[in-house]
Amino acid sequence: MEDLLKSLISIQGKLCVPKSQFNNFGKYAYRSLEDIEAALKPLLQSHNCGIRFCDEIVEHSGRTFLKTTLFFFNSKGDSISVTAEAEHASEKSGMDKSQITGAASSYARKYALNGLFAIDDTKDADTNEYQGQTTQTVPPEQKPIPSTPKRTTRKAMTQSINSVPQPQPQPQYDRYAGIRQMLSTVQTVADLVKIWNEHRSEVEGNDEIKAIFTARKNELTFNAA
């Protein structure tokens, strides 16, 4: 077991999975299950380790969830397991039943991998968030050489300084803009819970967004009473 724990510590320190996908509806960057597995496989191979999933359907208070168990093991037979759940909707617009199950499985497996391998939300250099902060370099102008020297008065110098365009502040990228929009238009507490479960990894560390969720839940509950 000690060797397995050493492998886990090493993989946690080396694994980096940028949020290279972009949700056009929600306007936010994210990482997919496939992105995580592609970055993880070489590290697993270098430590003679592997992973496997086991999915099952469970119920909590009348709601259905897909529960996945992630097993992390080595060639000696040692293993560690973690679990994660994602709500399994009875129906979803544009999806058949098998696609709904597949989406719930992907969410649960991704959350299990995030938890076991300590995948964080660092803004890496190849993500959309980082690229949106880069600036362009403008080549300097070629100044003409005056034919005769001219005396520059203090008034002319002041006007010249004032005429230089001042840098304008760049708008900040709001990664939660799409979620804010969805919260403002959601009509039922059930739909609000779905949004929370689908975007839990993006909002759990943001107290402001969590407060908006709570306020919207209270508002919907009051309106439904």
Image (spheres, rainbow, N blue to C red):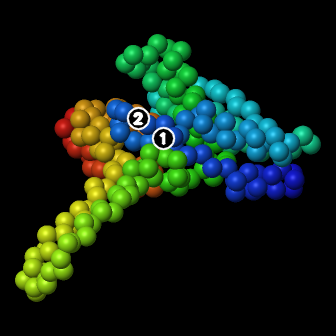
What residue is shown with label 1?
A: 30
Q: Position of residue 93 (x, y in %)?
A: 37, 18
Q: 222 or 193, which is in the foreground?
A: 193
**Left or right side of 220 for 65:** right
Is residue 158 found left or right of 65 in the rendered image? Answer: left
Residue that badge 2 annotates? 23
Residue at figure coordinates x 51%, y 40% from the top left: 20
Q: Is residue 210 visible?
A: no
Q: How many marks?
A: 2
Image marks 2 and 1: residues in contact by CB distance under 8 Å: yes
Percent x, y of residue 76: 92, 42
Q: Amino acid at mark 1?
A: Tyr
| SS type, badge 2 | strand
Is there any visible trace of residue 224 in the rendered image? yes
Q: Is residue 183 above or below residue 170?
A: above
Q: Which residue does the image show at 28% across and 58% down from the upper left? A: 170
Q: Which mark is residue 43?
A: none
| In front of the other: 106 or 56 | 106
